[in-house]
Image (cartoon, rainbow, N blue to C red):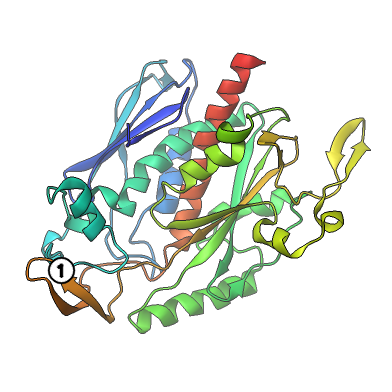
Amino acid sequence: MANSYGKLFRISLFGESHSEAIGVVIDGVPSGVELDMNEIMFEMGRRAPGKNAFSTPRAESDAPEILSGIFKGKTTGTPICAVIRNTNTRSKDYTPEILRPSHADYSGKLRYNGCEDYRGGGHFSGRLTAPVVFAGAIAKQILKKENIDIFAHIKNIGKVYDDCIDIANPDIDALKNLKWETLPFINKDKAKSAEEEILAARSDADSIGGSIEAIVSGVPGGVGSPFFESVESRISSMLFSIPAVKAVEFGIGTEFSELLGSQANDSFVVENDTIKTKTNNNGGINGGITNGMPIVLTATIKPTPSIGREQETVNINTKKNVKLKIQGRHDPCIVQRAVPVVEAALAITVLDLILEAKTYA
């Protein structure tokens, strides 16, 4: 069950970075959903590598081959299985005895007794987020029919921060158009500065991290459960399955630690006969249950650990300290390619929560 997620809308991942293919089995998709395959391919393209100077030169089409569950353009209600072929691998770049800092080389060896596929990071690789985006693209189309939309922008890359958004009343039109951008910043001048930061890191044989702010609009109040099944717990669980995510915050997140209760609380108001909150510091969730305000969260993305600089590490065979310069093709910044992955992870989780809510409504 370690490679599966979800209760009613459930996905299972398979494959490794350099195996013949990677893929996903999606269970719980309602029958009769007409899917826009062009929209699915657009989402896949947002994540795909090899498109610009900000990503790895490993070029993959990421075109999913659908084996089951879709017939004549509509879902059948049976499991959807899709594979994505790996067509541009260079396994010679990887030496299993030299542990790469901040990768899963050592922990993977301990977990799988040295039997793991180490090439390109194997099953630990960010390559496995491609089938997540495929599943998320399907979930997005189903959520759209429920008037639920998911948007995201880059909050920062390094010390370059995008403009703040009003998380209580976000400008949906501005966020909607960002999916066409290579670097989805609201402020285009900040995007240019971020581009310079990424290229500077690349030229210095280094990498840089950042964060992604995401908003889910249209989720009704009353979805979720307290404690162990809270909306925060379910979303965080899925987001932390993205290899580069190292922190998740809801609403204003860590800013709560600096505030008084009188400053932090979201006051309730009535607008057009609807109960809302004036602010949205809690990110649309109280007691683990949605309150009808937009769900807002931030996911922190670590710098790509594969860098060309010399680093200290260990040869696991000789148990000697050695130096390493990582070879291969790697992203100087993964943040921009992680934006559609974060959106997909949210779509999968929110759809699962919505389907669950309908069972107890």
Asked whether 312 or 130 is in front, the reply is 312
Asked whether 199 or 155 is in front, the reply is 155
The three-letter code of the residue at mark 1 reads Ile
**Image location of residue 210, percent across then percent down:** 51, 66
Q: Which residue is mark 1?
A: 98
Q: Residues within 10 Å of mark 1 (few under 14, many from 20)?
A: many
Could you tell me which residue is drawn at 30 percent across and 74 percent down? 307
| Residue 263 location, quadrant | bottom right
Asked whether 32 or 315 is in front, the reply is 315
**Image location of residue 258, percent across then percent down:** 74, 65
Could you tell me which residue is drawn at 45 percent across and 22 percent down? 29
Please say whether residue 253 is visible from this viewpoint. Answer: yes
Please say whether residue 344 is visible from this viewpoint. Answer: no
In the displayed structure, would residue 311 be above or below residue 301?
Answer: below
Q: Is residue 147 left or right of residue 335?
A: right
Could you tell me which residue is drawn at 15 percent across and 61 percent down? 90
Could you tell me which residue is drawn at 70 percent across and 34 percent down? 290
